Image (cartoon, rainbow, N blue to C red):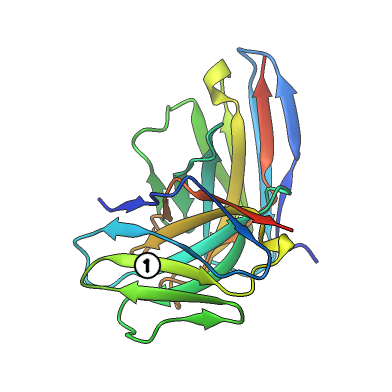
Amino acid sequence: AQTVTQSQPEMSVQEAETVTLSCTYDTSESNYYLFWYKQPPSRQMILVIRQEAYKQQNATENRFSVNFQKAAKSFSLKISDSQLGDTAMYFCAFSGGGADGLTFGKGTHLIIQP
Amino acid sequence: DTAVSQTPKYLVTQMGNDKSIKCEQNLGHDTMYWYKQDSKKFLKIMFSYNNKELIINETVPNRFSPKSPDKAHLNLHINSLELGDSAVYFCASSQVARVPGYEQYFGPGTRLTVT
């Protein structure tokens, strides 16, 4: 079974700063998929970014990018030019690609200060 | 149009009751899921279902049962509710068969409170 670890329960940065959220995982699978989901106070789960393990290139989506280190089993999320609307819980998640659902980390509560 | 919808969004009930939460997706996805988010915000898969196969997380009590009347719906039935069942329940869907690792789309969640 796979595990996902997020070691930062809470982080706080000033608006416009860059922040990096860490995530490590453990799996014996060779092909898998990694995700970052955002959960604002509205509680809706929103996909931020997706990475396929067989792709070496790090995924980027506007101000969001990942640093995927397959050998180290590390998948960190970088948010550039942070905005007040980025305040939310951020969850790292693992999928083996089958229909057995996502394995989530415990989340990081990110607070963007004005 | 809402991609994944759940009803109700809030549910307050007493211990021992039986309740259901409905979920519908209009994305044409082949797989649907139920997750439980506890009071510490931890999300855990409960079930996944793709109209041929039901995968059950072994830690889920058998008081919980998913029922799928068709490909677009996966309802969650809970019997003999207990205080520890209080949580937010999320339905999700994805297209697994043709696009392995495709992201899951989540419903808005149902906050269940058992008193």
In which quadrant of the rendered view does residue A34 lie? bottom left
- Give the residue at the far right of this rendering: B1
* Residue farthest bottom in this picture: A57
| Label 1 secondary element | strand
Report which quarter residue A51 is drawn in.
bottom left
From the viewer's side, name the closer residue of A3 and B30: A3
Rendered-image quadrant of the C terminus of chain A: bottom right
Q: Is residue A97 visible?
A: no
List the residue tagged with mark 1: A75
Q: Residue placed at 42% from the left, 27% from the top?
A: B61
Residue B108, image x, y percentages: 70, 50
**Which percent across, then down, holds residue B64?**
50, 31
Residue A16, given in percent of the width and then of the height, sits at 66, 70
Q: Chain of mark 1?
A: A
In the image, is residue B9 above or below residue B5? above
A6 relative to A44 in the view: left or right: left
Which one is in front, B79 or B1?
B1
Which is nearer the eye, B112 or A13? A13
Q: Residues within 10 Å of mark 1 (few under 14, many from 20)?
A: many
Q: Residue at x 68, y 43 (%)?
A: B22
Q: Is residue A64 visible?
A: yes
At 60% from the left and 46% from the top, the residue drawn is B90
The answer to which of A54 and B48 lies nearer the viewer is A54
Under mark 1, the amino acid is Phe
Vertical order, B37 against A100 (above or below): above
Residue for point 52% across, 44% down:
B35
Q: Position of residue B86 (x, y in %)?
A: 60, 26
